């Protein structure tokens, strides 16, 4: 009923792939294919590719994002990049809380909250990832997990700031596995996230809040997933590295 209040967002998460030269080539391939998109198009790329991506996307409808950011503005954090630094480069989007950061690099609900805060304070739009492990789904605690991750990450976020937050529901068991959640499973959790936004803020905020699904979304299954009422776009890993596949998902979101 309220889907028309929201513009879909399709964001690529390139993970640890592509050199700067390869990033330029991929963006140049994607650009003409998504030029008439009726949704927002974002590519989140490795730090090392940000300048190449910002240059290659100039004058196009593609926005550039980073895959993570640190919570402090600067300091003794070897190997990290701050939200302030990203902003200074012209980066507009940043992913926080990706399950690969939580699983392999010790990100917790609290550090995800702090990274999200830093990104918001620096004027960026955050793609905040939440989602359950397979064992949690099997224990029937998906909603508790997703609600708790969301509540902690949004602590201190104002209603106005919500305009710069997108939540990507990404069941961990579906990421990079080729195992997609069914459209009904995706809808059930995306809807619950929207209901939580209504609970924490109000119905107006919930109606315009963008909730993406991520987890093996591809050219073949995008139509069905994106047709669901509460699925407002996708965070795309593997398929974002192939221009025709990414463009097909953008096309599905533009319908
Ligand atoms: C992701 O990395 O956020 C993701 C959804 O990956 P994939 O599409 O490859 O499952």
Image (cartoon, rainbow, N blue to C red):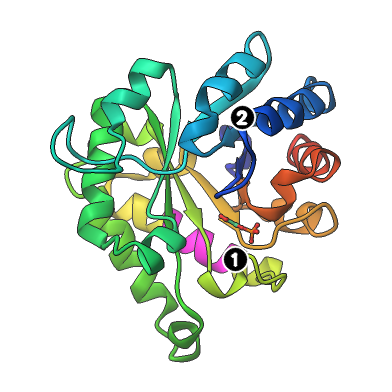
Image quadrant where one finds the C terminus: top right
Q: How many labels does the image show?
A: 2
- Where residue 186 appears, x then y in whole percent? 60, 65
Compared with 252, 138 (above or below) is below
Is 28 in the magenta? no
Dot 1, how many residues are within 10 Å of its Cα: few (below 14), some (14-19), or many (20+)? Answer: many
Residue 160 appears in view: no
Find out if the beta carbon at label 1 lies less than 8 Å from the nearest ligand 1 atom: yes
Choose mark 2 or mark 1, whichever is in front. 2
What residue does disc 2 label? 20
Residue visible at 68% across and 14% down in the picture? 60
Find out if the beta carbon at label 2 lies less than 8 Å from the nearest ligand 1 atom: no
Local secondary structure at mark 2: helix
- Region in magenta: 187-194
- Where residue 1 appears, x then y in whole percent? 62, 46
Q: Main secondary structure of the magenta part?
A: helix
Q: Which mark is residue 131?
A: none
- Where residue 59 appears, x then y in whole percent? 66, 8
Q: Which mark is residue 175?
A: 1
* Front in this rendered view, residue 116 or 177: 177
Is 188 in the magenta? yes
Q: In this view, does 109 lie to the left or right of 156?
A: right
Residue visible at 39% across and 69% down in the picture? 103
- Quadrant location, ligand no. 1: bottom right
Distance from the alpha carbon under mark 2 to that under mark 1: 25 Å
Write down the quadrant of residue 28 in the picture.
top right
Residue visible at 30% across and 43% down in the picture? 79
* Front in this rendered view, residue 71 or 81: 81
């Amino acid at each position: 009923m309220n889907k028309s209040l929201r513009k879909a967002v399709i964001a690529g998460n390139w993970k640890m792939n592509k050199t700067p030269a390869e990033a330029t080539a991929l963006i140049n391939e994607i650009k003409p294919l998504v030029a008439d998109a009726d949704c927002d198009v974002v590519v989140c790329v490795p730090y090392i590719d940000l300048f190449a991506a910002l240059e290659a996307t100039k004058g196009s409808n593609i926005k550039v994002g980073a895959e993570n950011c640190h919570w402090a503005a600067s300091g003794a954090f070897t190997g990290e990049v701050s939200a302030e630094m990203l902003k200074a480069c012209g980066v507009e989007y940043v992913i926080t809380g990706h399950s690969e950061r939580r699983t392999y690099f010790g990100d917790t609900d609290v550090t995800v909250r702090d990274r999200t805060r830093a990104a918001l304070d620096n004027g960026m739009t955050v793609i905040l990832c939440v989602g359950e492990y397979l064992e949690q789904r099997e224990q029937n605690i998906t909603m508790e997990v997703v609600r708790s991750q969301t509540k902690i990450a949004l602590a201190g976020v104002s209603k106005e700031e919500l305009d710069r937050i997108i939540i990507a529901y990404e069941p961990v068991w579906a990421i990079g596995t080729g195992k997609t959640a069914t459209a009904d499973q995706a809808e059930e959790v995306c809807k619950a996230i929207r209901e939580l936004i209504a609970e924490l803020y109000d119905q107006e905020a919930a109606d315009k809040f963008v909730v993406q699904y991520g987890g093996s979304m591809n050219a073949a299954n995008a139509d069905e997933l994106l047709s669901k009422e509460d699925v407002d776009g996708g965070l795309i890993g593997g398929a974002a590295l192939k221009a025709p596949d990414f463009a097909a998902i953008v096309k599905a979101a533009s319908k």
